[in-house]
Image (cartoon, grey):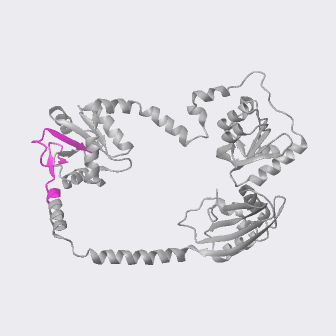
Amino acid sequence: MGKISPVAAKYIVHANIEIDGVVDRPDVIGAIFGQTEGLLGADLELRELQKSGRIGRIEVNTETRTGKTKGSIIIPSSLDKAETSIVGAALEIIQRIGPCNAKIEVVNIEDVRISKRSMVIERAKELLKKMMEQTMPDSQEIADEVAASVRVMEIVEYGKDRLPSGPAIDESDEIIVVEGRADVLNLLKHGFKNSIAINGTSVPETIIELCQKKVVTVFVDGDRGGNLIIKELTLVADIDFVTKAPDGKEVEEITKKEIHKALRSRISGEQAKLELSKEPEKTAMELVRRQPQQPQQFSRPMQRAYHPVPNIRRFVQLSNEEKNAFKSMLEDLIGTRGAEIIDNKLSVLGKVPVSEIQTALKSINNAHAVVFDGSIEREIVKAAEECNVKFLIGMDSKVRQNETRVNLLTVNELN
């Protein structure tokens, strides 16, 4: 939510803000969403515009001096001129933020395309100047181009499988096995005449025979497909060394310097086989990092403490005052990715981003509840248990109530 590609943004709304009091960034964002809700109709609802990517993340920068807060608001937009102007004008109806009087004034609406056009003109001038300076190539460049073309013409077909290779396969004691014809061409261009391509996913008989007679270095692309080829070769052929192109690159596109660096850092075939045998474990750990919403599939030892415990306190009855206070705080935080730490008198002890809740709890005493714009996850629950927090209030929960002594509340339970 709230993300918009800089390429897609056509306009940027710049506004100044003056507040007669001390407030934080989440207060300003909450006021923008809350006080403009329903004002412009469903088509120009800020939350819906952010979800569809037509309004970007609202940036608020504030500075407090002598009890007053001043700052700026920046809103990127991919709407048309009229709609962007309406959104900008809607900001100026906000007269209070929290308990304080406030004034917002839109300074200007910047057309991003004008800035890009100026950049294009300046860059075009630089390119034209560079082209005029380099129109006539020197003799060395001509010689290099001719030499490279000769090397490319030297590619041959080797063995009964007619595999693309360099001309020096038979006379070389060491050979380089690559994935495809383009890889052989790139190595030839840089002076390596002893390479040969597998030319597919299955290992040809010609390659297996060469591996029995010569010292073989397998040189594959820096991706998962390269790992699969190494694994297959180590199963059916006698591989001496293994190396890979830099991560995300293919052998056919790397430079001479990168080729030499890769060949110098090659490892033995046995070591490669050992590392690949550990790959499923690595893949599982990567999946945990990519999918935190399902930690039970790859739970770490430190999370095993979250099994149901006998005689655990299930829930403490909320008073009406607490319920209304928590509901109001949560509504104000929507869209801010912020959190408020509350004491037992429902006073705010501190405001932090969701990512810093665990650190903040360790430094704040007497925390009674934490209200935040995010999902209740195991790491936050564990930090709350250690600090004797009684309530965690979030948008939704990935932890069941019977797994913790902290009382877990979501936006649905407060309605």
Q: How many discs mark residues in the rendered view?
A: 0
- Asked whether residue 161 is drawn in magenta, I would say yes
Q: Position of residue 387 (x, y in %)?
A: 73, 33
Residue positioned most to the top: 310
The part of the image, by quadrant, that contains residue 335 is: bottom right
Residue 411 showing in the rendered view: no
Residue 299 showing in the rendered view: yes
Name the residue rendered at 24%, 54% in the picture.
186
Q: Position of residue 188 (x, y in %)?
A: 19, 53
Name the residue rendered at 69%, 35% in the picture.
383
Q: Position of residue 273 (x, y in %)?
A: 33, 31
- Most foreground residue, 197 or 247: 247
Quarter of the picture holding the N terminus? bottom right
Name the residue rendered at 15%, 42% in the picture.
160
Residue positioned most to the left: 171
Name the residue rendered at 32%, 31% in the picture.
271
Instruction: Name above or below for residue 280 compared with residue 137.
Output: above
- Asked whether residue 251 is drawn in magenta, I would say no
Q: Is residue 213 left or right of residue 337?
A: left
For the record, the magenta segment spans 150-179
